[in-house]
Amino acid sequence: MRFSWDKLRIFYLTACAGSINRAAELQNKTSPAVSASIRSLEKELGIKLFNRLESGLSLTIEGEHLLLTAEKVYNMLRSETEWQNNRRGHNMDHIKTLAPSSILTRYIETFIDKFIIANPHTRMTLLSSDGLSLAEKLNTDILISPYIENLTGYVQEPLISLTLRLYASKGYLEKHGKPESPEDLDKHQLVAYSIYGNRPDDLNWHLHIGRPKNNPRKAYMDIDAHLKRCYICSKDVGIISVPPQHPDLKKYDLVPVLPELAGPTNTYFIICEENIAGYEKNKKLISFYKDAFSAL
């Protein structure tokens, strides 16, 4: 049975998005138009593709089977379109990067202007990958992410390893003294890292080190991930946990605390589809990212 690629593409993106409204937003279409396309495809195939739930959409067994085919076709056509555009010289001035918001706002935004100045004819798109499905994350030229297991057809190269360590302002240490051991942290004002009200244990390892299991220290202050924690701690409020590459450490003159201690390490990779990794625009930006991150 033959049916249009456009309907299959809308089905694929809707399945990735998990809702009609989200799919419409991603495709710059109206929700009724997306719904109509899905209904038309279901009628043509004679099967039901989605279960409509109050919380969104879930795939039927038939929908899950079609998704496997749709994903392969989607990626093949996207790669072919990229190759043809590259061969004809089209879209050579545009490149898109997806990365966690923490990488975008703490690191990339501090140096991406150098790439833009050096490549004035290149149009940049920088988007957060937070909350996206894997399929949505891979719909880009370059993805910066932790390593993705069982990902075929993509190049994954290490970019940067961020190991959490402890820092404070000189003023805070003058007032409260320097801790000499992990146990000394019990006497200090520790600033916790919070994400939408949740406090991840790995990012707040300084509340646990040197303490009995399941008996962490109480945080003196919780600061949301989107606020400038280094700036707040420069006001002598306490000790924070950040990687030594964090650009705000130098900006606000924060100094190491218990430098022999190290928290968890998160390694990020540059991920690019094999078919487009060799394109000049991608090679140029990947090289720039590697140099810029290594210089941090």
Image (cartoon, grey):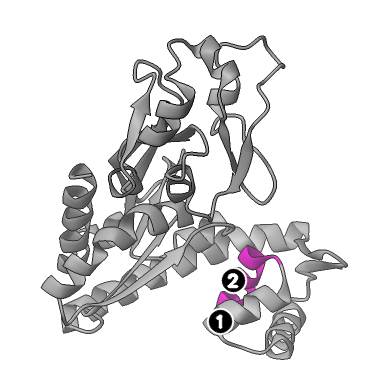
Q: Which mark, residue 13?
A: 2
Q: Is residue 49 left or right of residue 181?
A: right
Residue 27 image label: 1
Q: CA distance from mark 1 to mark 2?
A: 8 Å
* Image side of residue 179 versus residue 61, left or right: left
Q: Is residue 124 above or below residue 140?
A: below
* Left or right, 238 with reference to 246: right
Say which label, 1 or 2, has the lower sequence index: 2
Q: Residue at x 34, y 47 (%)?
A: 252
- Residue 16: say if magenta: yes
- Quarter the N terminus occupies: bottom right
The image shows residue 244 at horizontal and vertical percentages of 32, 35
Q: Quadrant of the C terminus?
A: top left
Decide which of 37, 229 is in the foreground and name it. Answer: 229
Which of the two residues, 238 or 83, is positioned nearer the viewer here?
238
Q: Amino acid at mark 1?
A: Gln
Task: Categorize mark 1 by other alpha carbons within 10 Å: few (<14), some (14-19), many (20+).
Answer: some
Which image quarter: residue 79?
bottom left
Task: Report helix, strand or loop for mark 1.
Answer: helix
Magenta span covers which residues?
8-18
